[in-house]
Image (cartoon, rainbow, N blue to C red):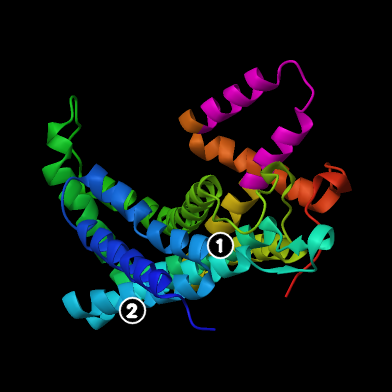
Amino acid sequence: MTMPYNTVLLALAAGLISAVVFASATTGPVLARFVLFFLTPLSLYLAGLGLGPAAGALAAFAATTIILLIASPVTAFVYAISTGGPAVIVTRLALLSRGEGEAQEWYPIGRIVAAAAVFGGVLAALILVLMGGDVEALTKAMRGVVENFIKTELPGLPGAPEMTETQVGEITATAVRSLPWALGILATTTILLNVWLAGRVTLASGLLARPWPDLAAIWLPAGATFALLAATAATFTDGMPGLIAGGFAGAFTLAFALIGLAVAHVVSRGSPWRNFLLTGLYGALFVFLGPVSLVLAIVGLADTIFGYRTASDRDPPSNPT
């Protein structure tokens, strides 16, 4: 089916915006670059959810082509895998449905979260390979980052200590072990944040085809539990396989932490202390991100296995095609 002329123009504009934001994210202050990195895919998600999957695919293709022309084939490939591909597939899944009228069923949000976690793990693995391809090269690259931070940024901090070579080595080793988890979490967060923002914008504009789901009722497919446990166990292996497994473990830990938040929202319904409890939870999550996220992930894993929420609180256990 041929897209209307206006839809084609809007899709091309969305691709151009994403390419420009992607290029801008490589320069400027660190905070600005960080924000731009998160928002690079947003126009693609807006095109996919608001104009349809075909328009989203056209926008991603246009952005990739522009980056190929202004940068390099490697950069365009990284963009296509890290930004364009996830945007096209996730928005396509979000608009999948079967049936009509009151019997219409939309693709479960929990499965979209699981798909985002898979993409997050893949992107983490890609970045690790591009950074070195083996533990020795990755450690060398990370040591360079640590040493550069110590030389350029650390002296400006009040009361900054002097770092010995041994301490630098310990910091580097810790950073290498933590990096895959952080990359998996960051990549998955980027996907989910953008699809949520695009969903809210298209809902407000009346362009979102599906009704807004009850996010507190999402559930993850059974395979997600196996993925988390298998990836976590694989992190204890040596070399790059263990590091790559860490990327997938981090991505699925985030997915289960979101289920933990959903559990908190469901079990607090009807309580006069609901606002106070949820505000305290999100405040603790902001201040103590790591420990609170781990607790939420454990709660989410337990709910997925044992079902603390009732069946009526969950998305329909279906898989529309």
Figure quadrant of residue 157:
top left
Front position in the image: 309 or 213: 213
Decide whether residue 291 is among the magenta residues.
no
For the question of whether residue 239 can be seen, the reply is no
Residue at the image point whose x is 31% and y is 66% from the top:
13
Figure quadrant of residue 252:
bottom right
On screen, residue 9 versus residue 140, left or right, reads right
Q: Position of residue 245 (x, y in %)?
A: 53, 66
Residue at the image point whose x is 75% and y is 27% from the top:
268
Number of numbered labels in the structure image: 2
Front position in the image: 118 or 249: 118
Q: Position of residue 166 (x, y in %)?
A: 26, 48
Q: Which residues are magenta?
A: 258-285
Determine which of the numbered discs, if any, sits on residue 116 in the image: 1
Front position in the image: 27 or 67: 67
Amino acid type, residue under disc 2 in the picture: Phe
The relative height of residue 317 versus residue 262 in the rendered view (above or below) is: below
The 10 Å Cα crowd at callout 1, few under 14, some 14 to 19, many 20 or more, is many
Q: Which residue is mark 2?
A: 77
Under circle 1, the secondary element is helix
Q: Position of residue 265 (x, y in %)?
A: 70, 34
Which residue is farthest front?
Answer: 5
Main SS class of the magenta portion in the image: helix
